[in-house]
Image: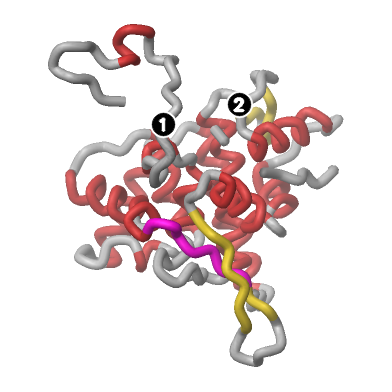
Amino acid sequence: MHAGHAGRSVRSTAVEPAPEERYGARCTITPRRRAPRLRSLLLADEFFLLGHDENTGKTVVRESFLEAGLAGAVLAELALAGRTDTKAGRIVVVDRHAVSDDLTDTLLADLLRERESHAARVWVDHLREGMRGRVAGRLVAAGVVTPVVGRGLTLRRPTLRYQATDPIVGSGPRVRLRYVMKSGRAPDLATATLVTLVRAVNLDDLLVLDLTRQQIRDWAAAALRLLPPALLDVVRAVAAVVETLIYTGDRR
């Protein structure tokens, strides 16, 4: 297996119809240069922001857990885009067309290069190391976060933080999940996947401060039941990798 190096997956007036209504749902509008719209963020982007403090840019969970979740999120992006599915417990490519995002397209190429398919857990474990930096690269390029180099408590080892350029955007995924959880509505597949990945890496305690831990777990369990096999396998793979990291005493 070869490691992939990676770097991404409007409002009308009362008189004139919106562009997507005039030209179809696939119409793409190039926005003015401004703080990025939250809805333009891909799954791994939102997961990344959830895993970092929007003000300091520091991780709020072990980096090894975060990277496992990010690896799963990027794999899930391919499944959500209809490029991959699961067969006999293994990830298979069902559509070779590019997604038009450097990170996911590189991963798709990695999958296609393999002579035989592999289980989601194998891919998560293979991809996780360095995935924080790869997803960060996508967000830095989009102007969502800014890398900040500092020093740890020992003043010897440099630390790399990713500070949100706009704290409102940085906190956006948490606000959105809070709204969805409290609305009582069934989430879409991307949101259901995001919540279950958050639960898999033990980030759920930081999600909704005004809900109990049990309420969040019950909601995540309900979301898990909505997932098709291709996404369910990825979420379970992330949970299994995190469990292994805990068992082996990984402190990173």
Region rendered in magenta: 160-166
Residue 32, compared with residue 98, is above or below; it is: below
Query: How far from the left and from the top, in percent, is residue 189?
Result: 40, 34
Query: How far from the left and from the top, in percent, is residue 113?
Result: 83, 31
* Relative side of 142 to 116, left or right: left
For marks 2 and 1, give the CA distance.
20 Å
* Relative side of 252 to 2, left or right: left
Decide which of 118, 67 is in the foreground and name it: 67
State the SS at label 2.
Answer: loop
* Relative side of 196 to 91, left or right: left
Instruction: Name the residue located 39 percent from the left edge and 50 percent from the top edge.
Output: 195
Which numbered disc covers residue 99? 2
Q: Is residue 91 magenta?
A: no
Which numbered disc covers residue 31? 1
Q: Residues within 10 Å of mark 1 (few under 14, many from 20)?
A: few
Instruction: Name the residue located 36 percent from the left edge and 51 percent from the top edge.
Output: 173
Residue 30, compared with residue 167, is above or below; it is: above
Q: In this view of the protein, can residue 224 be seen by the observer? A: no
Label 2 sits on what residue type?
Val
State the SS at label 1.
Answer: loop
Query: How far from the left and from the top, in percent, is residue 133?
Result: 65, 57
